[in-house]
Amino acid sequence: AGTPADWASVVLLGAGVVAGLWQARRSRAILFFAAFALTAFLPVSNLLFATGTIMAERLTYLPSAGLAAIAAIALASAGSTSSTRRVATIAVAVLVAAYGARTYIRNADWTDDVTLWRSAVSSVPASAKAHRALAEALYDADPSHANLDEVMQHADQAVALLEPLDDRQNTFQAFRQAGAYGLDKASQLLASGVSPANPELRRLYSRALHLLDRAVVIARHAAEQTPGYSVEPEADAQRLRAAAILGLENFSLALNAAKRSRDLAPLHPLGYRLSAQALLGMHRDEEAVMT
């Protein structure tokens, strides 16, 4: 985007290449390991093409082998006397012990998906991805979904963080999931005996519809920007929209959403069932049976 940070990155990359070439005559080993690190990192760097991952530790495992070799060569060169070799050895030992201890402590975060994403949310509370992933992990961890309130809390936090972004830069899944969790909560309340006229139910359906409307817009922008993009995300959101609108008892609008989902995904049975429910609500029983 041409920001100062972007230019700093370009300068650093160029300086690294120059430094590596400068070593060509001084040390072929350093040139080799520098080229190894760059070559191993380049395919996942997002420099040549977008990979779908901004940053991840796993992307640096192989390149770090080249950097570790350069560090070892530099330490060996610096340790020309016994005292400097002793200092270098102690420094490396302290670093290895410190990072080893940190790795051991970190291992507990990898117990399961819930502990992993709780750790991520704790470390980066402003990450929408971390909150959305924690919501999904919590939802999958409890088949009874008794923890749905906590699931919705993190899903809503993810949406709140993404709300200011332009639809062309946004993520469909966060809004889709948050809307779906709201529908699940409404179903939970109905199953517990809450009256369909309860105001909380209307609030949940309205909130879900608002989120799913945004999901539809994001899906359409993604389809416009990417040739061959699947229409299933919008079809899925339209089916959920139809369910939310049925909860609000606006049957004609629910029918429109269900029909749109059928146009996009004519082989998915749920679109037809939702259409039939809407038609029954409009007292068009024969059409509902045929649908």
Image: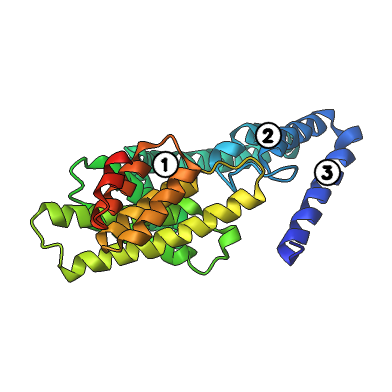
Which residue ends up furthest to the left in the rendered image?
A: 193
Taking 37 as reference, is 270 left or right? left
Earlier sequence position, callout 3 versus callout 2: 3
Residue type, numbered disc 2? Ala
In screen coordinates, is 254 left or right of 59? left
CB within 8 Å, label 3 to label 1: no
Front-most of residues 75 and 101: 101
Residue 158 seen anywhere in this rendered image of the structure: no
> Residue 25 location in percent, x, y?
91, 33
* Few, some or many residues within 10 Å of mark 1 (<14, 14–19, 20+): few
Closer to the N terminus: mark 2 or mark 1? 2
Give percent across and percent down for residue 23.
86, 38
Q: Which residue is mark 1?
A: 101
Assign the C terminus to one quadrant of the image: top left
Q: Determine crowd level at label 3: few under 14, some 14-19, many 20+ residues with C-alpha closer than 10 A.
A: some
Residue nearer the viewer, 139 or 118: 139
Instruction: Name the residue beneath numbered marker 3.
Output: 17
